[in-house]
Image: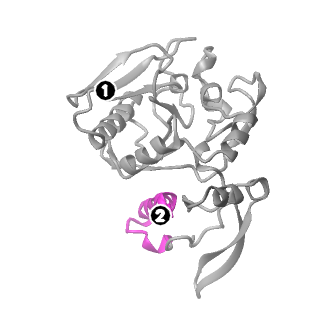
C-alpha cells in the first residue's frame, strides 16, 4: 500500500492549521484513509502495487471491464463536528492498470523558489548515491519543459542537463534537447512566467522498474531544506488524441500523467513532447496485456 499522498495531504492540513491559529494542527488531520473536517476528495489518495504469481491473474485483474469502469470499494470518511465525528460511507471506483504503463513519478512540496537545475541536481545526486557506488556511467537527468519557466528568450528553450559522473561530482551543461538512453525528463507542473516551479515536478522514466526504484530513493528526500513527496500519480493514464500543441496525432496514444496543455511548453520540437517518445499505442497496449514481461 502506498500512502505518500495521504501524508502529503496531512502536511498541508497541519501547515494550514498552523498558519491559522499558530499552533500544531493535529485536529485538522485524520488517520490513514480518512479526511476530517473537509468534503470527500473526488478520488482516493492511497493506491496499491500488486504482484501476481501467475500471468493469468494479472490479465484477469487488468481486463477491459475493471480498467474502464472500475471496481467499487467502500471508504469511510470522518467529518469533525462539535458533538464529535460524523461517519460517512463513500463508494469509490478503483481502476486497476498494468503497472508497466506507469512510468512517471509526481514530485510534490518542492520549494517554489528552487531553480530547475537545483531540483535536477538533488534528484540525480540521490539516484547516483543509491546505485552502485562505482558506476562509471553515473546519472543524467535533463529538462524538457523549460518553456514553462519563462526564463528563456522568446521562442527559445533552455537546454539543461545535470550529470553525476562516476566520482559522484555533478556538472550542469547545455545539451541538445533530445535526451539519450534511459535519462529521466522533468516537466514543471504549472506555468510560471517568472521563475518558480509551482511546487511540483514530473519525472519520466523508460520503464516501470526504473520509476519504482526511483520512488523508493526520492521519497522524503531533502531538497532545498524541505522533504519532498514522490510517488506514482493516483490517476489512470490518459488517452490523448492530440499532442501538447493541439496537433492531431496519427493515432490516439496513452500517456501516464500528461502535463495540462497550458503548462506543456515543449517548444516547436515535437520529440520533446512525451506523448511522442513515451506514449503507448493501442497495438502496443494489446501486446503488453498478452505478454508475461
| Relative height, residue 61 to residue 286 (above, below) | below
Residue furthest to the bottom? 83
Question: Does the magenta segment cover residue 2?
Answer: yes
Report the residue at 60% width, 17% height from top: 267
Q: Find residue 137 and name its label.
A: 1
Q: Position of residue 112 (x, y in %)?
A: 43, 39
Q: Position of residue 259 (x, y in %)?
A: 62, 35
Left or right: residue 51 compared with residue 90: left
Judging from the image, what secondary structure is the residue with disc 2 in?
Answer: helix
Q: Position of residue 174 (x, y in %)?
A: 39, 14
Q: Position of residue 146 (x, y in %)?
A: 50, 23
Residue tagged 2: 10
Report the residue at 57% width, 21% height from top: 272
Q: Provide the residue span drawn in magenta.
A: 1-29
Front-lying residue, 27 or 234: 234
| Relative height, residue 214 to residue 85 (above, below) | above
Judging from the image, what secondary structure is the residue with disc 1 in?
Answer: loop
Amino acid at each position: 500500500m502506498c500512502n505518500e499522498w495521504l501524508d502529503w495531504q496531512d502536511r498541508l492540513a497541519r501547515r494550514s492549521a498552523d498558519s491559522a491559529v499558530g499552533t500544531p494542527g493535529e485536529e485538522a488531520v485524520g488517520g490513514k484513509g480518512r479526511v476530517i473536517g473537509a468534503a470527500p476528495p473526488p478520488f482516493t489518495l492511497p493506491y496499491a502495487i500488486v504482484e501476481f504469481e501467475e500471468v493469468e491473474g494479472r490479465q484477469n485483474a487488468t481486463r477491459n471491464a475493471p480498467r474502464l469502469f472500475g471496481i467499487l470499494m467502500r471508504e469511510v470518511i470522518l467529518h469533525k463536528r462539535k458533538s464529535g465525528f460524523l461517519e460517512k460511507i463513500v463508494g469509490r471506483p478503483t481502476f486497476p492498470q498494468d503497472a508497466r504503463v506507469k512510468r512517471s513519478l509526481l514530485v510534490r512540496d518542492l520549494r517554489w523558489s528552487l531553480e530547475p537545475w537545483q531540483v535536477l541536481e538533488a534528484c540525480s545526486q540521490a539516484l547516483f548515491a543509491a546505485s552502485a557506488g562505482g558506476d562509471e556511467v553515473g546519472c543524467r537527468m535533463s529538462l524538457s519543459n523549460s518553456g514553462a519557466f519563462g526564463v528563456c528568450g522568446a521562442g527559445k528553450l533552455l537546454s539543461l542537463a545535470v550529470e553525476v559522473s562516476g566520482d559522484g561530482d555533478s556538472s550542469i551543461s547545455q545539451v541538445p534537447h533530445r535526451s539519450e538512453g534511459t535519462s529521466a525528463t522533468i516537466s514543471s507542473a504549472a506555468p510560471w512566467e517568472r521563475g518558480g516551479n509551482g511546487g511540483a515536478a514530473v519525472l519520466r522514466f523508460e520503464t516501470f522498474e526504473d520509476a519504482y526504484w526511483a520512488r523508493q530513493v526520492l521519497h522524503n528526500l531533502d531538497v532545498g531544506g524541505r522533504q519532498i513527496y514522490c510517488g506514482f500519480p493516483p490517476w489512470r493514464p490518459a488517452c490523448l488524441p492530440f499532442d501538447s500543441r493541439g496537433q492531431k496525432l496519427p493515432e490516439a496514444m496513452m500517456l501516464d500523467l500528461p502535463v495540462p496543455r497550458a503548462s506543456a511548453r515543449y517548444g516547436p520540437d515535437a520529440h520533446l513532447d512525451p506523448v511522442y517518445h513515451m506514449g503507448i499505442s493501442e497495438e502496443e497496449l494489446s501486446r503488453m496485456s498478452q505478454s508475461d514481461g
